[in-house]
Image (cartoon, rainbow, N blue to C red):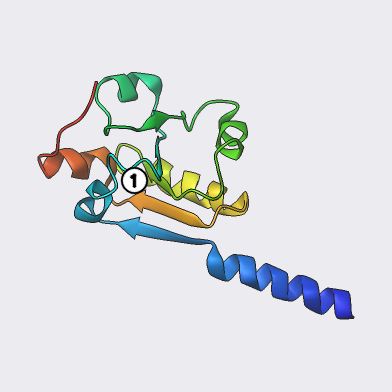
Amino acid sequence: MKSLITFSLFFVSISVFSQIRLLEVDEFKQVVGNKNVQIIDVRTPYEYNSGHIQGAVNIDYYASDFEKQLAKLDKNIPIYFYCHSGVRSAKAAKTMKALGFTKIYDLKGGMVAWKKAGLKVSR
């Protein structure tokens, strides 16, 4: 019984601390250039090469080894996701939560919102 309670408390702790925060463009752009974060573009390589947020690393959501690549990332460093419009990045963020990451941020509206705000992209 004691181990069941301990496990339950551990699971609740992980659930409480593993939150996905949806960020507006203004909030997301504040971390660009920060060396203490991981910015991940989950679009295809073609989409990434057509223009991406400065400092972003491309990990294709559709790649067969997507989860394996995510699992290699540092769990102690905040991770920021984006895609084209927010659908793939939301799914990627949920995957990260399941992998035990705790500092997860997702760009609301993805690159569509980024470009609409007039912000620059790198090539």
Q: Residue furthest right?
A: 1
Whether residue 45 sits left or right of residue 8 in the image: it is left
The x and y percentages for residue 111 are 25, 38
Is residue 72 shown left or right of residue 24? right
Q: Residue at x 32, y 43 (%)?
A: 34
Above or below: residue 20 compared with residue 9: above
User: Where is residue 21 shown, x and y percent of the image?
Assistant: 39, 60
Q: How many marks?
A: 1
Residue 70 percent across, percent down from the top left: 55, 37
Q: Is residue 62 above or below residue 11?
A: above
Instruction: Give the quadrant of the C terminus.
Output: top left
Q: Please give left or right for residue 114 compared with residue 118 in the image.
A: right
| Residue closest to the eye, 68 or 86 | 68
Q: Which amino acid does the dot numbered 1 rest on? A: Gly
At a point 61% along the width and 39% down the height, the residue shown is: 71
Q: Quadrant of the N terminus?
A: bottom right
Which residue is tagged 1? 86
Q: Position of residue 50 (x, y in %)?
A: 25, 21
Numbered disc 1: secondary structure: loop
Spot the residue most to the left. 118
Viewer-side residue, 69 vs 90: 69
Badge 1 crowding class, 10 Å Cα cut-off, few under 14, some 14 to 19, many 20 or more, is many
Which quadrant of the structure image shows residue 17?
A: bottom right
Residue at 78% x, 70% y is 7
**Which residue: 40% across, 45% down?**
36
- Between 31 and 2, the residue placed more toward the observer is 31
